C-alpha cells in the first residue's frame, strides 16, 4: 500500500506495449497444472439424488460439459450423471475439452442416438445455434446448465448461480477486507489488477459487471490504482478461461508495472486464474510478507487448500450438488410434465427469448469460514483438505 502517486501516463504507455487482452491470447485451453484433481477425490461427498422414486423409465439424457481441465466441471458431470441415473434415466455424459467443434459433434451424436433431453454447459454460448435448432426440430428439449445458451429459442430452462452476484461478492470482499472506505478517507491507495473470464461465456461479463459496479468508484477516486491501466472487460477477459494466459498476463503486469511497488490485489474471476497468478507471484519473488489479496471462483479443492496455506485469499463457493438438483428438476419437468422450481424470469434474455431460470446463491469463502461452509456442508472432508 502506498500514498497516492499516480503515474497514469507512464502506465498507459507501458500498457500499450503489453499484449495481454483476451483478443490477443488465442491460446490453448487452460493447462490447469495446479487444478485437475481426479474425479474420485474431487467429487463432493454427497451425490445423492433428490428423494424421488425412479421416474426416468429408461429415457435418455445427453449431458454435454465443456472441459475436464477444471475440477468444477468434473464434479458437475459426476453429480448430474449420478442424480439422473438414480431417477432411472440413461445418461450420455460427454466432455469437449474446450473444443467448440467437438461439442457441436457431441450434441449432434446425442440427437442422432435418440436422446430425449439435452443438458448443455456450452463452451461458446453462440456456437450451438444450428445444432440446437436440430434438437428443436426433433422435439428434444434443452436445458442450459450454468452457462446461458444464446440466440436460440430451443432452450426450455436455465439452471445457474447468480452470476452478477458472484462478481458483487468478490468485489465486496475486497472492499471490506481492504477497508477501501477507510483507505479513501485516509488518502491511501492499493494497487489492483484484473483477470476476467472468457468473452464467449455470458457469465464472464455478468461477473465483471458485478465487480466493476462496486469497485469503479474506488478506481475513479484513486483509492484503487490499476497500474496496467487495464480495467475494462475487453482488456481483461481471458479466452476459454485459460490459466496459462492468466499466468502470462500476471507475469507481464509484474514485470512491466510492479518493479518498484507491490501488487496489492489480484482480482481474478476463477480459481484456475488464481493458480496462474500464484505461479507468477512465486516467480517474481513474492512471499507471505507481501502476498496480495487473491480472489477466485468455484472453491475447487486445490483453491481451498491454497486458501488454507495463504496463497489464495478467497473463492466463491458454488455448490454443484445443489445446481445439479435444480437442473434435474428441469429435466423431469420437460420429460415428465412436472413443474420445476424457477426463481428468475427476467435477467436471462438470450437475444431471442427470456429463459426461465433457477439461480443458486454463491457464497464467499476464506480461511475464516471454509470449515463451517465447505467442510460443514459436506462439500469436502477435512481429510481431503489435509492431503
Ligand atoms: C462458471 C464458473 C467457472 C468458469 C470457468 C463459468 O461459466 O460459471 O463457475 O469458474 O465458467 O470454468
Image (cartoon, rainbow, N blue to C red):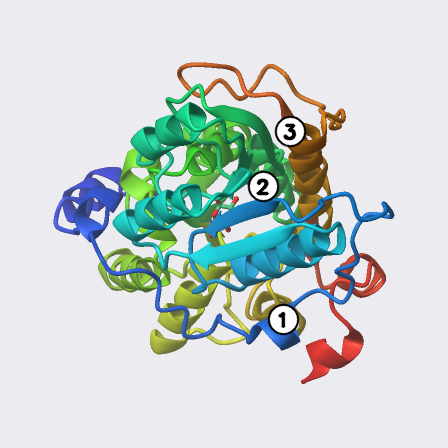
Q: Residue at x 33, y 29 (%)?
A: 129
Q: Earlier in the sequence, mark 1 or mark 2?
A: 1
Q: Earlier in the sequence, mark 3 or mark 1?
A: 1
Give the spatial CA distance, label 1 vs label 2.
39 Å
Helix, strand or loop at label 1? It is helix
Extreme left residue here? 17
Q: Residue at x 37, y 56 (%)?
A: 96
Q: Is the residue marked by circle 3 packed among few (<14), some (14-19), or many (20+) residues within 10 Å?
A: some
Q: Is residue 305 above or below residue 180?
A: below
Task: Between label 3 and label 2, give the one nearer the viewer.
Answer: 3
Q: Which residue is mark 3?
A: 334
Helix, strand or loop at label 3? It is helix
Q: Is residue 221 left or right of residue 250?
A: right
Q: Which mark is residue 183?
A: 2
Q: Is residue 111 left or right of residue 116?
A: left
Q: Which residue is mark 1?
A: 42
Tell me residue 340's x, y (percent): 73, 28
Q: Earlier in the sequence, mark 3 or mark 2?
A: 2
Q: Nearer the viewer, residue 333 or 259?
A: 333
Helix, strand or loop at label 2? It is helix
Q: Nearer the viewer, residue 151 or 224?
A: 151
Amino acid at each position: 500500500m502506498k500514498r497516492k502517486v499516480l503515474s497514469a501516463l507512464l502506465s498507459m504507455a507501458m500498457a500499450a506495449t503489453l499484449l495481454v487482452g483476451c483478443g490477443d491470447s488465442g491460446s490453448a485451453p487452460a493447462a490447469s497444472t495446479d487444478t485437475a484433481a481426479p474425479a474420485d477425490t474431487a467429487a463432493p461427498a454427497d451425490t445423492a439424488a433428490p428423494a424421488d422414486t425412479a421416474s426416468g423409465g429408461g429415457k435418455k439424457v445427453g449431458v454435454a460439459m465443456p472441459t475436464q481441465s477444471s475440477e468444477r466441471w468434473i464434479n458437475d458431470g459426476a453429480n448430474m450423471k449420478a442424480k439422473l441415473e438414480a431417477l432411472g434415466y440413461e445418461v450420455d455424459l460427454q466432455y469437449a475439452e474446450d473444443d467448440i467443434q467437438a461439442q457441436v459433434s457431441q450434441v449432434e451424436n446425442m440427437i442422432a442416438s435418440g436422446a430425449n433431453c439435452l443438458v448443455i454447459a456450452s463452451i461458446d454460448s453462440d456456437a450451438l445455434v444450428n445444432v440446437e435448432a436440430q434438437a428443436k426440430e426433433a422435439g428434444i428439449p434443452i436445458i442450459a446448465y450454468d452457462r446461458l445458451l444464446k440466440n436460440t429459442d430451443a432452450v426450455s430452462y436455465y439452471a445457474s448461480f447468480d452470476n452478477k452476484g458472484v462478481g458483487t461478492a468478490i468485489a465486496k470482499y475486497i472492499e471490506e477486507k481492504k477497508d477501501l472506505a477507510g483507505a479513501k478517507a485516509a488518502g491511501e491507495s492499493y494497487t489492483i489488477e484484473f483477470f476476467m473470464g472468457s468473452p464467449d461465456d455470458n457469465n464472464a461479463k455478468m461477473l465483471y459487471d458485478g465487480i466493476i459496479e462496486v469497485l469503479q468508484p474506488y478506481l475513479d477516486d484513486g483509492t484503487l490504482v490499476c497500474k496496467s491501466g487495464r480495467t475494462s472487460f475487453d482488456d481483461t477477459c481471458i479466452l476459454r478461461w485459460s490459466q496459462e494466459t492468466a499466468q502470462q498476463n500476471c507475469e507481464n503486469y509484474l514485470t512491466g508495472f510492479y518493479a518498484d511497488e507491490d501488487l496489492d490485489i489480484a482480482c481474478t474471476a476463477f480459481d484456475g486464474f488464481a493458480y496462474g497468478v500464484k505461479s507468477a507471484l512465486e516467480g517474481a519473488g513474492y512471499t507471505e510478507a507481501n502476498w496480495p489479496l487473491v480472489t477466485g471462483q468455484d472453491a475447487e479443492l486445490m483453491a481451498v487448500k491454497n486458501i488454507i496455506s495463504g496463497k489464495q485469499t478467497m473463492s466463491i463457493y458454488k455448490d454443484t450438488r445443489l445446481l445439479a438438483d435444480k437442473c434435474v428438476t428441469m429435466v423431469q419437468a420437460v420429460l415428465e410434465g412436472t413443474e420445476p422450481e424457477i426463481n428468475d424470469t427476467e435477467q436471462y434474455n438470450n437475444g431471442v427469448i427470456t429463459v426461465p431460470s433457477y439461480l443458486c446463491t454463491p457464497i464467499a469463502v476464506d480461511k475464516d469460514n471454509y470449515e463451517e461452509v465447505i467442510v460443514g456442508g459436506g462439500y469436502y472432508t477435512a481429510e481431503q483438505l489435509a492431503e
